[in-house]
Image (cartoon, rainbow, N blue to C red):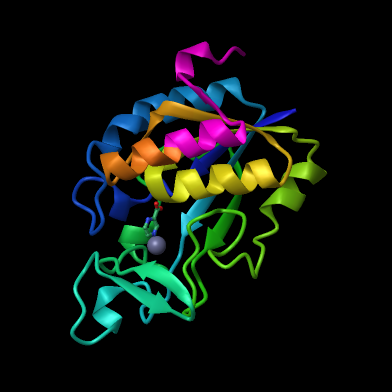
Amino acid sequence: MRALLLIDIQNDFLPGGSLAVPEGDAILPVVNALQEKFELVVATQDWHPPQHKSFASNHTGMNVFEVIDLNGMPQVLWPEHCVQGTMGAAFSDELKQNRIEAIFRKGTDLEIDSYSGFYDNGHLKSTAMADYLRGKGVTEVYLCGLAADYCVYFSAKDALDEGFKVYFIEDATRAIDQENYKQAKTDLLQRGAHIIHSQSITL
Ligand code: VGL
Ligand code: ZN
């Protein structure tokens, strides 16, 4: 059984959003069409409290995209994004949402960021998405969404570690940084993920 994971397709990661991914909106028609091919569709949602420590605005004198040590881990400081309950945190209106069976929220703990939809960045707390998927009989996960070099990449890595067969749908994702994305793809291929085009997915 396979599942399609929609990673963080939220307004703040789309054009006009506070952490807009270049060409992020180009994935929307692809993702909408893809959903028809899957029996199970699940989504993740970046969902930060306003005081979240991944925001540069919560560190005096720090700039966006600087890296700090946060509780012993390197942390990129982001613009404020995906604040709980705001329009920026909502899924895009252009995203087809009626097929989404479950939504896993992440990044709710002030003290630690959470790129992956499965675990926080320190692998301390689980969202239980892996158990949910296993409970549904899923053995293969197909990933799409934003951003390719952060949340989609980290979700793919955790999915591999959880023992799922992993398909990274390249034309249904976009990256924040092209250089990061190149490294992410090399790493995923080495770990055994399959990088595919949406057109190669059969019904
Ligand atoms: C993301 C940076 C910060 C993402 C989330 O969804 O890729 N990136 N928070
Ligand atoms: Zn975030």
| 74 or 7: nearer the viewer | 74
Question: Residue 94: which quarter of the image?
Answer: top left
Region rendered in magenta = 185-203
Question: Residue 92: which quarter of the image?
Answer: top left
Q: Is residue 123 left or right of residue 63?
A: right
Q: Identify which residue is drawn at 36% across, 26% down.
A: 29
- Please provide percent x and percent y for residue 95: 40, 38
Determine whether 141 is above or below 17 in the image. Answer: above
Picture quarter with the C terminus: top right
Q: Identify which residue is drawn at 42% across, 78% down.
A: 70
- Please provide percent x and percent y for residue 10: 37, 50
In the rendered structure, does residue 115 fall within the stretch colored magenta? no
| 62 or 74: nearer the viewer | 74
On the question of residue 96 being in view, the answer is: no
Q: Is residue 113 left or right of residue 124?
A: left
Determine whether 197 is above or below 42 in the image. Answer: above
On the question of residue 97 being in view, the answer is: yes
- Please provide percent x and percent y for residue 132: 74, 49
Picture quarter with the N terminus: top right
Q: Identify which residue is drawn at 39% across, 77% down.
A: 69
Determine whether 42 is above or below 112 in the image. Answer: above
| Ligand 2 image position (quadrant) | bottom left
In the rendered structure, does residue 194 fall within the stretch colored magenta? yes
Q: Identify which residue is drawn at 47% across, 68% down.
A: 113
- Please provide percent x and percent y for residue 121: 53, 64
Determine whether 98 is above or below 75 in the image. Answer: above
| Total numbered labels placed on residues in the image | 0
